[in-house]
Amino acid sequence: MSSSFVRAIGPAVSIVLPRPRPQPVTLEGAHVRLEPLVPALHGEDLIAAFAEDHAGMMWDYLFQGPFPTAEATMQWLEAIADKPDPLFFTVIPKATGKPAGVMSLMRIDPAHGVIEVGGITLAPVVQRSPATTEAEYLLMRYAFEDLGYRRYEWKCNALNAPSRVAAYRLGFSFEGIFRQHMVVKGHNRDTAWFAIMDHQWPAAKAAFETWLAAENFGADGSQVASLSQLMAAALPGRPSGAGEM
């Protein structure tokens, strides 16, 4: 073997590690406000919003729920509040001013600058709305710009087609399937992994902000440009995972 052979060990990392841990901050947007989850403050409205999902479909791919009673739902909210990881936020759409869901930053790894968004539990009233898209944007911006993380992850049941479509729409790249990764509610879960990197964030941020701008929506709420179109132009060549179901 030539003495000039160089072993590949990856590029040097220039950012300072570890990165700060996320804190229970309030994040404000045009359509939504994210507040640290406080069951005594948010719980009753969350329970009422979740109850509108009469078929219980919003819980299908989640680790918990549906809950048999309002008391059981409150117990779950109390169990997940005030934890550093996962760190839960309440989703409050400004159109109503009432809590309509929760989401978290989780599997937080300051030593390597890696963080995941998860625990996304949204009532029907806020699903597929600008408020939920902006909530995702606010958490992503917080992770990349305020905390300086290198990698932002999204994971879901590989059978959860809407979640996989949402991940790609939000700028994530499909990375693969972890087979027999978990057992959830007595069923096997293969997990689809998605991620977006810090160097992709400026382009993704521009796509988010173009989509969220008031001029991108007609008087009837219709979109001039979809976020999927904007992200495809901003981050070309990303694997979507659509063919890996």
Image: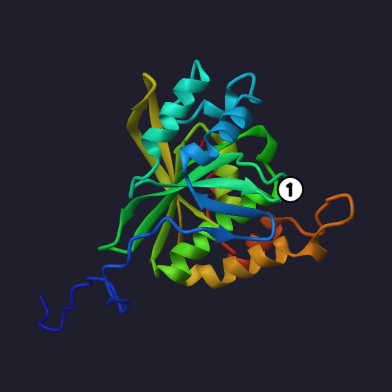
The residue singled out by tag 1 in the image is 95
x then y, percent, for residue 182: 33, 31
x then y, percent, for residue 143: 44, 63
Image-based side of 180 in relation to 47, left or right: left
Image point 52% across, 25% down: which residue? 60
Image point 44% across, 70% down: which residue? 146
x then y, percent, for residue 22: 38, 59
Residue 28 in view in this figure: yes
Q: Is residue 102 above or below residue 50?
A: below
Image point 59% across, 64% down: which residue? 236
Amino acid bearing label 1: Ala
**Residue at the far front in the pictured view:** 40
Image-based side of 59 in relation to 14, left or right: right
Q: Is residue 54 above or below residue 76?
A: above
Label 1 crowd (10 A; few <14 / some 14-19 / many >=20): few
Image point 57% across, 46% down: which residue? 91
Q: Secondary structure at mark 1?
A: loop
- Residue 15, quarter of the rendered image: bottom left
Observer-nearest of 67 and 13: 67
x then y, percent, for residue 23: 39, 59
Q: Is residue 94 above or below residue 185?
A: below
The chosen color scheme is rainbow
